[in-house]
Amino acid sequence: MLLCTRGEGSTVRNWKFWLGVAVSVLFLYLGLRGLHLGEVWKAIHQAEFVWLIPAVLIYFVTVAARTWRWHYMLRPMKWVPLRALFPAVVIGYMGNNVYPARAGEFIRAYVLRAREAISMSASLATIIVERIFDGVVMLVFVFLSLPFTPMPDWLRQVVIFGSAIFLGALAAFFVFAASPHLAQRVYEWLIAHLIPGRFRDPVRSLVARFLEGLSFMRSPRDLATIFAISLLIWLIETVVYWFVMQGFGFRVPFYVLLLMNGVVNLATTIPSSPGYVGTFDAVGIKILEGFGVSGSLAAGYTLLLHATLWLPITLVGAYFMWRESVTWRDLGAAARAKAEGTGNV
């Protein structure tokens, strides 16, 4: 069990929580500013909800594909059956929806350690690389959309900054995975110069387990496979956007939905309240407005799409919590450890 302290840590968590709420409120204001909420509700009320059925089914296809990807990344450490990984993935995504700061990623690693005895540091390494690949795919979607649409200045800055961050991180992880001796020299130097003596052995052990989680990156073939799976995941998820759109009275080309998917998911990396409230919605609304969709219709669509991506996975995650005997205390401990950087990982 992860042990967390109260007091200062609680104050930090509260500060981060309220900062996330403020960011969400700001983005919601920017997204809904100038719109009549009655018209937004009318757009949602008049939508054909039957289209949400295939949308939800397709979304769970992407969850299965994410499970397959994680299974592939974990193979050098341990062969974990898909049926054992799927509950951890779903519980983790539920955790992202109910805890701030993407704590669900830490919760997923926590559940995997409890069920499969894989260290949290190693599994977190694979999860971080997952997110890097996801970011790269989002940028690919943006670039694929560029020939068909002008790029506003703010989006150009997002693409430049995001490209530098994600590609730089991917390159660094690849170098460390391909050259374990180089990685060891680097982290031994950093530990010797930056970490107090009594903490050096625990930090050294943590970093070694983290680097173990990068072992799959030593194979170019495995890297290409992970990228292909990631591309497939997000293409399928864009189909979810398309199905929800069928329930509303507007149509935009598929490349617009690719652009929207890419940019809104890049925007959700901005710290906000649980479930990416506001950061997802404001950016989605503005992109659709830029392609001629009325503000109220764009807002109704984006809010209902967000709910479609949020509610089913959260409910299924709660079911797997019950089935796997994972308690809210367990999730809370993992989330607090993530926020405080503590715990046995």
Image (cartoon, rainbow, N blue to C red):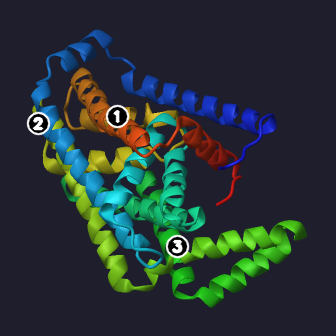
Q: Residue at position x 80%, y 34% from top?
A: 7
Q: Which one is closest to the eye, mark 3 or mark 1?
A: 1
Work out how far the residue at label 3 is from the one at label 1, CA to CA, in angstroms.
30 Å
- Which comes before the other along the chain, label 1 or label 2? 2
Q: Is residue 289 above or below residue 86?
A: above
* Residue to which mark 3 is pinned: 213
x and y, in percent, of residue 271 in the image: 54, 41
Tell me the amino acid under the disc marked 2: Arg
Q: Using the image, tell me which numbered label, if any, was put on residue 45.
A: none
Q: Residue furthest top?
A: 38
Q: Identify which residue, 196 or 77, lies in the foreground.
A: 77
Q: Which one is closest to the eye, mark 1 or mark 2?
A: 1
Is there a contact, CB below 8 Å, between mark 3 and mark 1?
A: no
Q: Residue at position x 69%, y 53% from top?
A: 343
Work out how far the residue at label 1 is from the one at label 2, CA to CA, in angstroms.
30 Å
Residue 84, picture quadrant = bottom left
Q: Is residue 37 above or below residue 108?
A: above
Q: Residues within 10 Å of mark 2 (few under 14, many from 20)?
A: few
Disc tally is 3
Q: Is residue 112 above or below residue 287?
A: below
Tell me the amino acid under the disc marked 3: Gly
- Which comes before the other along the chain, label 3 or label 2? 3
Question: Could you tell whether 220 is left or right of 29 in the image?
Answer: left
Q: Is residue 238 above or below residue 135?
A: above
* Residue to which mark 2 is pinned: 251
Q: Secondary structure at mark 2?
A: loop
Tell me the amino acid under the disc marked 1: Leu
Q: Residues within 10 Å of mark 1 (few under 14, many from 20)?
A: some
Q: Using the image, tell me which numbered label, if any, was put on residue 315.
A: 1
Q: Residue at position x 53%, y 65% from top?
A: 117
